[in-house]
Amino acid sequence: MTTLISIRSLKKYFPIHEGFLSKNTKTVKAVDGVSLDIDRGEILGLVGESGCGKTTLGRMSINLIKPTSGEIFFDGVDILKLDNPGLKALRPKMQIIFQDPFGSLNPRFTVERIIGEAMMVHGLAERSNLRSKVTEIMQKVGLPNSFMNRYPHEFSGGQRQRIGIARALSLHPRYLVCDEPVSALDVSIQAQIINLLQELQEKENISILFISHDLNVVKHLSHRTAVMYLGQIVETAPTKILNKNAAHPYTRALLAAKPSTNPKESSDHVPLSGDVPSPLNPPAGCHFHTRCPEASDRCKTEQPTPFQLEERHTVQCHLYN
Amino acid sequence: MPTRPPLLHIENLTTSFHTNDTVVQAVRGVNLHVNQAETLAIVGESGCGKSVTALSILRLISMPPGRFDSGQIKFNNQDLLSLSEAEMQKVRGNDISMIFQEPMTSLNPIFTIGDQIGEAIIQHQSATGAEARKQTLELLQKVLIPSPETRIDQYPHELSGGMKQRVMIAIAIACRPALLIADEPTTALDVTIQDQILSLLSSLKKDSEMSILLITHNLGIVAQFADRVNVMYSGKIVEEASVDSLFENPMHPYTRGLLNSLPKDDSESKLESISGAVPHPAFLPEGCAFHPRCKDAMPRCQQQPPLTNATKENTHKVACWLYEEGGEGL
């Protein structure tokens, strides 16, 4: 497998202005030095709690948000150095599916226009053959043809998410960011959408960054998983290895916190104490040390660096280094 | 516990909402009971009527458009639906209390958390301000809020989501209720915070005789936390069983579908999904509401199946024709 997306020391700091004439400026370090590779045809799961920066990272990776610093390579091209025409030519290859199927579709557009607009913009369809192209894509994602002239409010959450997927796939992307695509859906509908994503990924060999807070879904779907905490990736490993041999105390706590659906498998673990600290003022040293059951003095002052445990398994923790 | 009568007994409850052009029956003839010191879970997808059932118990449904078409809600052998509003006010927050899904919007932003917890104590126990403050501090300790002396004078916006939910729990248990209704108490929280809140609720349950009615869509929480389960679909209970029995031997095709659509630990295969979507409550299909999505539907499903015992021990009930007399099940 070869690398399609390569992210190097990516940072995004959001300034917060406070006080009279915005005198006091603080920064939220939403993403703080992330390096990550995604292979061709790979599904990389990105998990973490709310506010850890996973959405910001996902959006930056397709240049929807400009990073503060760092580099992003798409197939060897640094997309941050591209000019507008160059970026436009690349856009069809990088697409995104959003979390909220209610907010991400224009309520005044018909399904045909929602799905077809991007194809028109990028010259992949003409007015004359638009309808047949849209039909083809709708079939692919399991939407009946009769939906073509209807509006988003007429559909259920699952159907809307299918429309969102159809819109993203209409441009034949090679890289797709899925930002919590199933968390707004009911369990029985979730399974439909997960199966659909899996099928399409296999058929078209797309690389996917699958952002989720649901470890079960990530476990089922992704080949490799990255765990994020307060703007940093704390552990990356092939999904199977991560679930068996999680190294970082945070990953282990996340896995233990997930309630098992087997009533006989009762867990007697101690829940992680405290809350995620504010990204405005993250703790010194390892960001996780305030909640970590295994923290030592070193963790309070010195920030750990990524350490390779074995091939493709990297952890950022002093316990291993 | 069979010797003691159930704490809460809902019989044939129907709650509907009337608008200008439609009548929506959100709860359609529900029977359920909660025993003393028991945790009963109601599971179901959005729109199945689980929250309306909970709100009906406390009569928090605004009327109109809401209306109770039939039924009784017996709490300690007293029908809550026949009480006057003033009598009901004495039950709310005192005998039965509730925690809501959104801790962010359930607290009043202009009062300190001490005021909000103390209000319940002053209201129901005619305590003085000083007594209430003392009890409030104890409650904050009980729900494991660090440095309660400072927190008591803070406003909701100064607290994180998990902290706010702890405050909600403190308000709910302030008057030692016999029944706590928890409506998706952890849905808005992160997984590590959810874990903290569930372990807090478990320890509170152990320390008291409190019964809990837990409403959730998360089957993992049900498996770990509840004693008994009712599965709801389109306003009706379709299956009722002990937790072990339900997860070991799910009977209703809907329950089976739900359990099968969860990502499994060991599988690489496709998830099984239930085709279609939940029907709109104003346009329910004839008979069993699940039959248009059911793999095992048969002509008889055009009629509503009753909720009947499926085992000899009377611990597992299901509303499906597959298990009716002569039916072989799945």
Image (cartoon, helix red, strand yellow):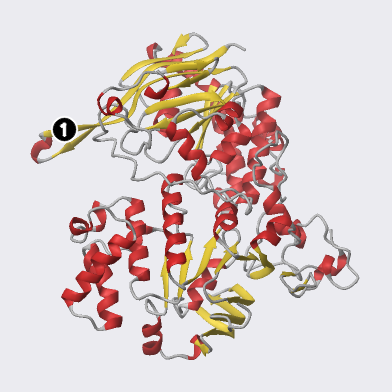
Q: Residue at x 64, y 61 (%)?
A: B243
Q: Residue at x 59, y 35 (%)?
A: A219
Q: Quadrant of residue B286?
A: bottom right
Q: Is residue B241 left or right of residue B84?
A: right
Q: Check the image and name the residue furthest to the top.
A: A76
Q: What x and y, as percent, mark residue B308?
A: 76, 74
Where the C terminus of chain B falls, by quadrant? bottom right
Q: Residues within 10 Å of mark 1 (few under 14, many from 20)?
A: few
Q: Is residue A69 above or below residue A102?
A: above
Q: What x and y, as percent, mark residue A245?
A: 55, 28
The chain holding disc 1 is A
Question: What's the amino acid at mark 1?
Answer: Thr
Q: Quadrant of residue A87?
A: top left
Q: Quadrant of residue A290?
A: top left
Q: What x and y, as percent, mark residue A136?
A: 71, 32
Q: Residue at x 33, y 65 (%)?
A: B170
Q: Residue at x 55, y 20 (%)?
A: A93
Element type where label 1 sits in the image: strand
Residue A70 appearing in the image? yes
The residue indicated by pointer 1 is A25
Q: What x and y, as percent, mark residue A267?
A: 54, 48
Q: Is residue A165 left or right of residue A83?
A: right
Q: How many marks?
A: 1
Residue B233 appearing in the image? no
Q: Is residue A90 above or below residue B41?
A: above
